[in-house]
Image: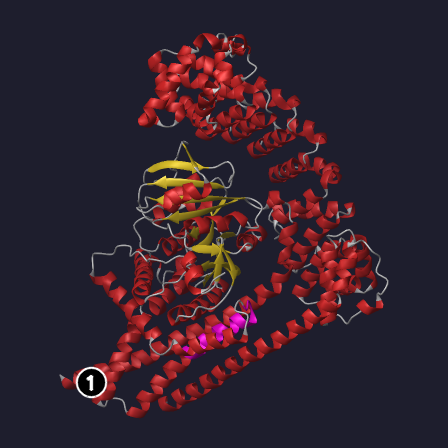
Amino acid sequence: MEILSLKLITWFNHLVLAYYFAANGTYLLLLVLAAAFIATHLSRLEYGRYQNSIHPSVAPPVSLIMAAFNEETNIVESVRSLQHLGYPDYEVIVVNDGSTDSTLQRLMDGFSLKRVNVIYRDAISTGRVRGFYVNPDFPKLIVVDKDHGGKADSLNVGINVSRAPYFCSVDADSILEDSAITRLMRPIIEEPELVKATGGIVRVANGSVVKGGRLVRVELPRDSLSMLQIVEYIRSFLFGRAGLSQLNSLLIISGTFSMFHKKTVQAVGGYMSNTVTEDMELVVRLHKYLREKKIKYRINFVPDPICWTEAPRDLRMLKRQRSRWHLGLAESIYIYRKMLFNPRYGRIGLFALPYQLMIELLGPGVEITGYFVVSLSFFFGIVDKYFFLLFIIMAVLIGIFFSMAAILLEELSYRRYRGLKDVLKLLFFGVVENFGYRQLLALWRTQALFKFLFSKKKKWEFVKKSGFTNEERNDRAV
Amino acid sequence: MTYLLIQLIIWAVSVLILTALVAVVARRIFMGRKYAILDREKERHSGLLIALSSGAKIESEKALTARPGSPSWSAVEEFLFKGLDTPGREEAIRLFDELGYTRHYLERIRKGNRWDQALAAEKLGRIRCQRAVPHLIEALSSANKDLKLMAINSLGSIGDEAAIPHLISILKRSLKDEEEVSTRVLKSALISFGPAVLRDLLSELDNDDWRVRATVLEILCEINDMAALSEFTRKLRDDEQEVRAKAAKGLGRLGSPDAIPALLHSLDDQDWVVRLHSARALGLIGDEKALRALKETLCDRNWQVRAAASEAMAGIGASGCLELLRVYIEESDQYAREQALDELLRADIYSRVAGLLEREDILKDHGKTADMGKGADPVVQIAGMLSTLGPDKLREALSSISGKGAGDEDAILKVCKSLKENQSRFSGAGSQGN
C-alpha cells in the first residue's frame, strides 16, 4: 500500500512537471503572439486618425447598453461620462435591473428624466419592463426600468430597445475614455462583413483621479491589493487576450466593455440569463453558431480603447469576484463541452476551448495540488531538498518573468503610468504578486471549481464597490 | 538530466527577467529624454503655430528645416498639421512643400515599409496634396491593404475628380467580393466629392448588380442633391427591394413634395422594408397630403411599418397627432390603436392639452375661443375632439394618453371636467380635422 502511494506521488510529480512545462510553453507562445500583435497594432495606430475624417454617415450607429443593479454610488457619473464620447452616432441605454437602492431616482434627478410609455417588443424574451425614462435635453439617453432579472436579462432588454446595428455593453462602475468607441469600432469599419465582435482593454481606476464621471489623471493606488490587480490586469489583457486574438481564438471579451454586431447576437438568442458569466457564454455561442453556419468571421481584441473600472479593495470582495469568474468559466466550458477537441469547430474546438479547460480552468487546481504533493514528496523524501528548492525557484521565476514581460509590453506600447517611479512600482508588484497573491487566487479558483462540481448553489455573488466619488474624496483631493 | 534542465531554465529565465527589467527602465528613461527633447523643440518652434494662426507668411524657412525623423522635424510637422485648421492653411501647405515634407511622404509611399506607406498616404490626404493624386491612384492597386485603405480615404479628402472612376471601379469590385477593402471607407470617400461625383454615380444606377445600384443610391442619399430626384423616383420601381428601399430613403432625405405621389404608391410595396422607408420619407417631407395614406398604413401587417407610419404622422405635426388621436378613438384595429397611442404618448399630447386648459386667457375670453375651432392651434382641435367624447370614453382616453393609467385619477378627472365645461368654446374644433 505504502509503495503504491509513493509510486502515485512520484507519478503525480512527473505529471505536475509535464503540465507545468506545457502550460508555460503555451503562455510563452501567447506572449510571442501578443508582442507581434501589439507591434502591428501600434504601427497602425498613428494613421488610425483617418477615422476622424470619414463621413459620419458611414460610421455605424452604436447603442451603449449599461445594466445597473444597485449602482447608486456611481451611476450618474458613469452615465455622464458616456455623454462626451467622440463617436458620431450613438445612444446610451441604461437598464435599471430592479435596483433596491436609489439607482433609478438618482438617474431621474441627475438627468431630469420624465417617464414615457412606449411599446416594448421583446425580440429576445426578457423579464417585465416597467417603464421608459427620457429627457429631450439628453436625446442620446434612454433609461429603462425593469423587474430584477440579472445582468444578462438587462442586456437583452437593452438589445431589444436598441435601434443601432451594433451595441456595446458597458458596466455601470466603469469609465470609458473619449476615444474608446471610435477605437473599438475601427476593425468593424475596416472589415464590416468579417468582424462580429470586438473587446477593448479594461484597466483598474483605483487611485486615479475621477471628476464628473471622467478620468482626469491616471495615478497608481496606494493600497497593495489594487496594485496587485493592476499588474494582473496588464498581464491578462496585454498578453493573454492579445495573443488569443491573434489566433482568432478569443473566448472572453470582457462584459465590462465589448462591442457586438446586434443581428448576429439576436440570431443566437441574445445573452443567456441562467449563467454566471454571460459574456464568455455569449462569445463561445457566437463562435459555435458562426462556425456551424460556415460564416467567415473574426472576434477581435483591440488593445487601445480603454475602459477604466474599479477593482475590489478588500480580499472578501476580490474572492467573490474571482470565484464568480472561475465558476462562469467552468460553466461555459461545460455547456459547450461537445465543442472540445471537435475538429468541426476548427481552432476553437482544438485549441481555444482545450486551452481554457486545461490551463485556465484546471491550472489553479493542478497548481494547488502540486504545491501540496511536491511538499509532501519532500517531507517523505521522494524528492530531495535540492530538487524541491530548484522547482520552487523555477516556478516563482517563471511567474515573475511573465509579469515583467507584460509590464515591458505596457512600456513598449501604451505607457499609461507616466513617471519612472510608477514603472518601478509596477515592477516591484510584478515580483511581489508571485509570493502569495497568485497562490491565493489559485486557491480561490480551485474552491470555485469544487463549488461548480459539487455544489448545487451557484448564485451570482454581488461585488460591492465604493464608487469613484469616494475615490476622489478619500484618496486624492481634486 | 531533469536537474540540469531545471537549472538551465532557472538561468535562462533569470537572464530574461533581468533583460526585461533593464529594458523597461531603460525604455522609460530613453522615452522620457526623447519627449523632453521633443518638448524643447516644440517650445523652440511654438512661434510657427502662432504665426500660422494669425495668417502671417513665414519668412524664416531655414530655421524650420530639419532632418526627417529628428525631434525638430516632428515638432515642425505637428505645428504644420495644426496649422491646417487655422487661417494659415495655405501657408502651412506651402511649408509642407518647401520644407520637404511632401517629397518625403511621396518617397515613403513608394519605398517605406507597409505601415510607413499607409501613414504617408494618410498624411498626404490631410495636407490635401494634389501632387499626390497619381501616387495615391497607383496605390489603389497595391497589395498593402492599409496603404490601399489610406489612399482611398485620402483621395476622398483631396477631392480631385480624376480619382472618381478609380474609386467607383474599386467599389464595384469590392461589392462583388473581388476586392478586400472596406466599403464604408469607399462610400465615405465618394461622399466627400459631393455633387461632383453625381454624373459617374448616376450612370451606375443601371448596373446589372443590385448591390452596386443600392450602394450608389446610399451614397447619393448622403450627397443629397436635388439633381438625383428623378433617378430616386425611377428607382422606386426597381426589381430589387433593397434598391427600392434605398430610393425611398433618399427621397425622404431630399424632402421634395414632388416625390409624394411615388412614395404613396410605394406604401403598398410588397416588401415591408420599402413600405417602412416610404412611410419614413413621407414623414420627413412633412406634407399633410400623406396623412390619409399613412393612417391606412397604421394597419400594416408589419409592426415596424406601423411604427414608422405613426412616427411619420407625428412628424408631420399637430395635424398628424390629431389623426393619430382619431385612430386611437375610432379605429377598430387593435394594433393601429396601440401604435397611435404609443406615438401620442411620445408627443406628450396629454400635457399639451392640460397646459392649454390652464391658459386662462383662452378659457375666459369668449370672443377668442369662438374662433378656436378654426384650427389656428391644432392642440385646440385635439382638445375639441376630446371634448366631444362621452364622459366614460373621455376619461378612458385621457387616462391612456396621459400614460398614468389610474395612477393620477384626480388630475385626469379635472382635465375631463375642464374639457366638458369648455366644450362649447371648442365648437367646430373636433370636426375640423374630419
Q: How is the image coloured?
A: secondary structure
Say which of B326 and B145 sits in front: B326
Decide whether the magenta segment is chiefly helix, strand or loop: helix
Q: Where is residue A282 in the image (x, y as percent from the top left)?
A: 39, 52
Which quarter of the rendered picture does the N terminus of chain A lie within? Answer: bottom left
Q: Where is residue B310 in the image (x, y as percent from the top left)?
A: 49, 25
Residue B80 drawn in magenta: no
Q: Which residue, given by chain and number where applicable, does mark 1 sit on?
A: A6
Q: What residue type is labelled 1?
A: Leu
Q: Where is residue A184 in the image (x, y as percent from the top left)?
A: 53, 55
Name the secondary structure under disc 1: helix
Q: Residue at x 53, y 82 (%)?
A: B22
Q: Residues in magenta? A: A399-415
Q: Is residue B298 visible?
A: yes
Relative vertical location of residue A132 with respect to residue B168 in this rendering, above or below: above
**Crowd around label 1: few <14 · some 14–19 · many ≥20 (10 Å):** some
